[in-house]
Amino acid sequence: MASRGKPSQTRRRVPRLYLVTPQQSAGVADLLTRSLRAAEFAAVLLRLPEMGESGRFEHIRAVRPHVQEKGVALLLEGHAELAARAGADGAHLDGVEALKAALPCLKPDRIAGCGRLPSRHDAMVAGELGADYVMFGEPDDSGWRPSLDAILERVAWWAELFELPCVGFAAALDEVEPLARAGADFVALGDFVFSDHRGCGAAVAEVARRAANAEAPA
């Protein structure tokens, strides 16, 4: 990977938004419609519910038009082998080994993202293997995630040194601006937008405002 070598500037480009769906089938299409109407997104990560492969396939096919018809990339959480067959744009993999196993299914036509990277070394290996982006700060299966300070440190380190885009995972509204200021190219929105009492559309609109207002050095 090449180093950034970016010229200094007084205001960083506004990070793009990346939406992570709840892990459910009922109501996801409606949530996506309302969320994608409220702000511009680069990608949606579809978390597939626990069901058989045929059910997952049909779920992806049902959700896909609500995303792709707006010009937004549809990624699957894992299940790289389903991406091509169901018409998704790629997959997000957990860890270096999962990325390595999935690359033959995804490249060169589809996006391969990688998260669950516990060390700087793992992140660099993911980039060297051919990941299209790395993600920092997403929770593990038990809900644990690093402290916000640790996530911001990792995002800032990556943003300063590498061209490959990084995604900062925001688990709460108040994390959006710090991630943007740290240099995240994309900010991923977790379940907080769907649990907001104002509705997901209002929550997404506020996220977009906060991201746009955050200033960061290049």
Image (cartoon, helix red, strand yellow):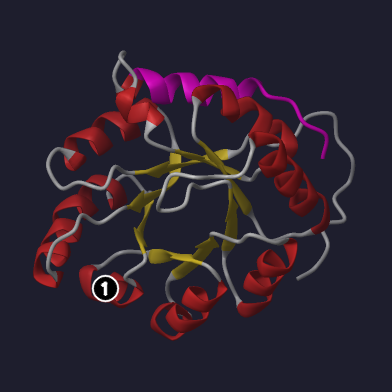
The image position of residue 174, as x and y in percent, is 57, 22
Q: Quick one: SS at disc 1?
A: helix
- Residues rendered magenta in the picture: 202-218
Circle 1: residue type: Leu
Residue 5 quadrant = bottom right
Residue 210 quadrant = top right
Residue that appears at 13% across and 62% down: 51
Work out whether 203 lies above or below 180: above
Q: Is residue 183 visible?
A: no
Number of numbered discs overlaid on the protein picture = 1
Work out whether 196 lies above or below 51: above
Residue that appears at 60% across and 59% down: 134
The image position of residue 191, as x and y in percent, is 37, 35
Residue 123 left/right relative to 7:
left
Residue with the mark numbered 1: 82
- Answer whether residue 112 is magenta in the image: no
Q: Mark 1: few, some, or many residues within 10 Å (few <14, many ≥20)?
A: some
